[in-house]
Image: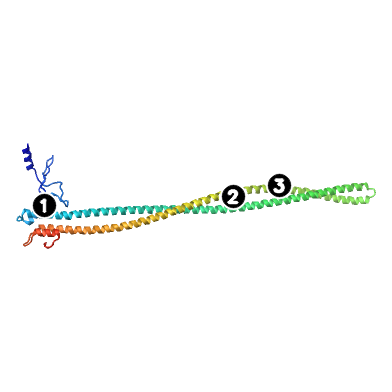
Amino acid sequence: MTEGAVIEDRTAALCGFRQCRAPLPPPGPRGGRPFEFCPDRRWPGDRTCKQLAAADQALREALGDSVSHAGLTDAAAEFVRAATELGGPLQTLRNALDSVAARAQDEVTSALTRAETAEARATEADGHRQAAEARALEAEHATAAARTQAQEQADLAKAARETAATAVKARKAAELDQARAEASATAAAERADQAAADTRSERTRADALAAELAQRSEQLAVRTTERDAAFEALTQAHTRAEETREALTTQLGSATAELARAGELREALTARLTTSSADLTAARARADDLDARLQAALRELQDERREATVLAGRLEAARAELARAAEHHDGLRARLERVHRLALANPTENFDLRAGLLAELLDLPGGSPRA
């Protein structure tokens, strides 16, 4: 059983690359073509066993069969070492540059996003500020209109008070006229009584004073006419006084009602003016707050723009460094191509191919002319 296992190990397929010679995996449960080289192994520079075996075969063909196995091994080892030394730092530099470029791109994208957000907030704050200014202007117009209306109502109230004062004066004048008319009527009544007394006195003296009686009768008739006229004038004056009193009472009531309405309207306008002033103060406070927020957003936008400028400078520096690394990579690739062409070229007399390869890989003098 042990001997069969040993025979199986001896007959197991090995990798075709001379520097590897690792056992190859079986083809698989479904069969298929057997492996000639390791399917998964990678060498420095991300080279497979198949690629390195092809390069080794090309190098053997270029050097000929006269070269010893040790020389080929050393040359291949030097080639692998040089490729490893060149590929490792180049890959590290490429990864570092890719990381720097990605980080710089992320920072620039983030800065641009913050700048756009700050601009949007500044635009929104500016719109709120303009709306607040418009509302403040409307409040000022409303306040001015309310003040104008209040002034008009005050003028109307003043006119009503003047009308009421005039009515009061007219009423007092009518009452004075009525008192004068009553005094005239009283005087006329007294004169009538005196005339009646005189008439009685004259009648007692009728026999002696017949002629004088006739004269007195005429005077009595005249005085009676005057009395009737005075009574009629007194009646008319009393009627006019009553009419004037009623008209003045009506005007006074209207003026009082109008004055009361003017007072109510004045109180309403005062309350409205107070409310408009409070709204105006609140609108101005909101406008000041929005203005402060706008200034803060503008300062934040300026900071974001300065940061974006710094990040853009860093990105340009990273791009320059990446360009220099690419130039260095192109130089290394050109050197490897020259090594490849040198390995595949036909050897000439008095030229050591191994020394030329090493000189080209290590950038030493003594190599062949570069094609």
- Going by the numbered disc 3, the residue's amino acid type is Glu
Determine the CA span between mark 2 and mark 1: 109 Å
Circle 3 residue: 246
Q: Give the mark nearer the N terminus: 2 vs 1.
A: 1
- Going by the numbered disc 2, the residue's amino acid type is Arg
Q: Which quarter of the rendering shows the N terminus?
A: top left
Q: How many marks?
A: 3
Proximity of marks 2 and 3: CB atoms separated by less than 8 Å: no
Regarding mark 3 in the picture, which secondary structure is present there?
helix
**Res 371 visible:** no
**Could you tell me residue 359's position as x and y percent?**
12, 60
Query: In the rendering, which numbered label is found on residue 266?
Result: 2
Circle 1 residue: 54
Q: Which quarter of the rendering shows the C terminus?
A: bottom left
Regarding mark 1 in the picture, which secondary structure is present there?
helix
Residue under the image location 87 percent in, 50 percent down: 220
In this view of the protein, which residue sits in the foreground, 117 or 322?
322
Position of residue 223 relative to residue 346, above or below, is above
Q: Give the mark nearer the N terminus: 1 vs 3.
A: 1
**Res 335 visible:** yes
Determine the CA span between mark 2 and mark 3: 30 Å
